[in-house]
Image (cartoon, helix red, strand yellow):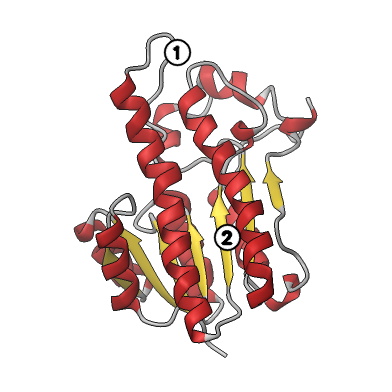
Amino acid sequence: MSRTVLVTGGASGIGKGIARAFVANGDRVVIADIDGESGAAASVELGCDAVQVDIADAHSVADAVERVGSIDVLVNNAGLIAIGGLLVDLTPDDFDRVVHVNFRGTFLMTQAVARQMIGGGVAGAIVNVTSIGARQPTRALGAYEATKAAVEALTRSAALEFAQHGIRVNAVAPGPVLTEMLRGAMPEGSPARTAWQARIPLGRMAEVDDVAPVTVFLASPGAQHITGASVQIDGGQLLT
């Protein structure tokens, strides 16, 4: 039976790959993105729907969830990574911006969709996209990684609270993923990519298609007894 799957940040990168995988699974997919034009273009390309939303704004979130209708699966993928810097140099405004989108935004989406699921008696699934950075720090990414650690804690709390309603909450925690943006920043053969790949036992960075199937699985009946888990997709990087 076709489900309605809402993917935040689905206009590009990991989110777009996840949306594509759910479309291939036969689900009705709705891309939720702050960039309405890019979201609409991606929805045409993938053959799905789109809704514009600012996940850090409670009113925008409530309006988007209402417009989508009954949701069976929420994928909290949207987030910021571009704001980096050593902790002693990071401005409070930049720190707040990362927290506002990555943590507050994930909370607001989770809250709104969970309320809808509970009210409608939907035993749905929520999958959060976090990062192995929540467990293994990288210099100059402290603010970003702190928000991902917070989302992992939120994942476990939500899993515990929502279990009585049959709602499962899990996370996928990728290492660096070769999105178009990262490919541009770290071209094949560049010193930066070579250095990072040296940290990964399997010898390569993840592709989007390494992340999407795990996300689909965690939202599927095949994972019906899995909740509160965070699955690392890092080629073994956390082992080093």
x, y percentage for residue 115? 46, 72
Q: Which corner quadrant holds the N terminus?
A: bottom right
Residue 47 visible in this rendered orientation of the protein = yes
Q: Amino acid at mark 1?
A: Leu
Residue 169 visible in this rendered orientation of the protein = no
Q: Quadrant of residue 46?
A: bottom left
Asked if the residue under mark 1 is in contact with the one under mark 2, i.e. CB atoms within 8 Å, the reply is: no
SS assignment at label 2: strand
x, y percentage for residue 53? 27, 60
Q: Residue at x 41, y 66 (%)?
A: 112
x, y percentage for residue 121? 55, 85
Q: Which residue is mark 1?
A: 86
Horizontal side, residue 53 vs residue 150: left or right: left
Number of the label disc, if any, that sits on residue 13:
none
Q: Residue at x 68, y 60 (%)?
A: 160
Q: Amino acid at mark 2?
A: Val
Assess disc 2: are there few (<14), some (14-19) or many (≥20) residues with their C-alpha within 10 Å of its C-alpha.
many
Q: Which residue is at the front of the view, 69 or 190?
A: 69
Q: Which corner quadrant holds the C terminus?
A: top right
